[in-house]
Amino acid sequence: MRDGRVFIAWVKHSRRSQLIAEKLGMRLFLVHALKRRPWLAPLRYLLQSLETWQILAREKPGLVFVQNPPIFAALIVYAYARLWGARFVIDSHSAAFIGGAWRWSLPVHAFLSRRAVMTIVTNSHLEAQVRAWGAPTFIIADIPAVFPPGRPFPLDGRFSVAVINTFAPDEPLDEVLAAARSLPEVQFLITGDPIRANRAHLTNGPANVKFTGFLPDEDYLGLLRSVNAIVVLTTRDHTMQRGACEAVSLGKPIITSDWPLLREYFHKGTLHVDNTAASLAAAIREMQTRERELEREVAELQAERRLEWETKQDQIERRLAAAGVPRPAPVAPPA
């Protein structure tokens, strides 16, 4: 076994995993296979398990971070850690606790969390649940980033908002489309892989709505930089919004849902809505009149988050050191 660190995530793309890996000196391995179809899940998880085991056997890291869900990824990492004497950390997203898809796995999750160095979660509500299992936990809500410029995204000159969307059940897309119908002077650019969409949404949207499809990073960042504001909504409480975190790093004003977690975390440069079309439309109108003021507030929030991360990064390294994990070797500057 070596002293190296790796991060395993069974997804095609994960900004959070990417940023944690960069900040903590880890190699990130994104393990994905086949399409996201329910009937393909058993085969997909088998293929991902085999590839993950091959990666771990080849790299022999002393520390493995693993994204959860799916719980199967954490199980493979736990098996490796038991066999090779490695340590592991679980980065559990909100979906691992909330919603129907993975609630069945909570007893397994608790078993693994009690054996991990720590389970990272996004908020105090989830932290309390992990602590109730008798397991060590740590909150990382956001990881500040410095993003590249991206490729400028073509807009039509109207006030524009990017709606960060994945066509997930907790995203109130019907309300977004209804708000768009009431604001023909605003351009709505809605992200997300259309393969997961309800076809009625794609075909019945108003003329001022553009579905961008899943965008490569260069185009996605260009879109977020080009618009006036970023909209990220969820109907599910205790759910951190990665898209709103990206907006803070980019210095863009935000419209997000009015949950206590999101109101507390995004307390500057942000308008909070009740997920209805009327509330969203009113917030966009307010954004049009307060855009510059909210941009200044987001810049203040960005500075707060960067200071907060410096403290958290040091705390994580101290926790890892206490568990016998050495700090990563500094990267030599290029010659």
Image (tube, grey):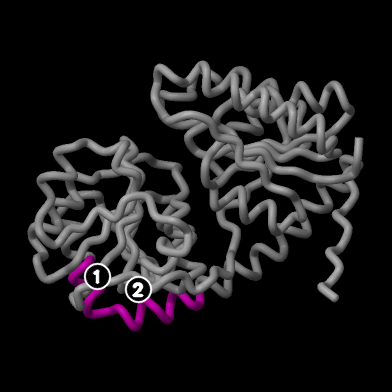
Main secondary structure type of the part rendered in magenta: helix
Comparing 158 with 265, the one in front is 158
The numbered disc on residue 160 is 1
Structural distance between the alpha carbons of marks 1 and 2: 8 Å
Task: Check if residue 298 falls in the magenta segment.
Answer: yes
What residue is at 85 percent from the left and 35 percent from the top? 60
Q: In the picture, which quadrant includes the N terminus? A: top right
Point 52% across, 46% down: residue: 13
**Which label is found at residue 56?**
none
Q: Is residue 128 visible?
A: no
Q: Is residue 49 magenta?
A: no
Q: What's the residue type where badge 2 is placed?
A: Ser
- Point out residue 231 in the picture as x, y percentages from the top left corner: 32, 59
Name the residue located 46 percent from the left edge and 64 percent from the top edge.
218
User: Residue 45: which quarter of the image?
Assistant: top right
Left or right: residue 287 versus residue 317 is left
Circle 1: element type: strand
Mark 1 surroundings within 10 Å by alpha-carbon count, few (fewer than 14), some (14 through 19), many (20 or more): many
**Marks 1 and 2, the one that precedes in the sequence:** 1
Q: Residues within 10 Å of mark 2 (few under 14, many from 20)?
A: some
**Mark 2, residue position:** 226
**Discs 1, 2 touching: Cβ within 8 Å:** yes
Q: Is residue 225 visible?
A: yes
Which residues, given as a range, are shown in magenta?
284-300
Q: Amino acid at mark 1?
A: Ser
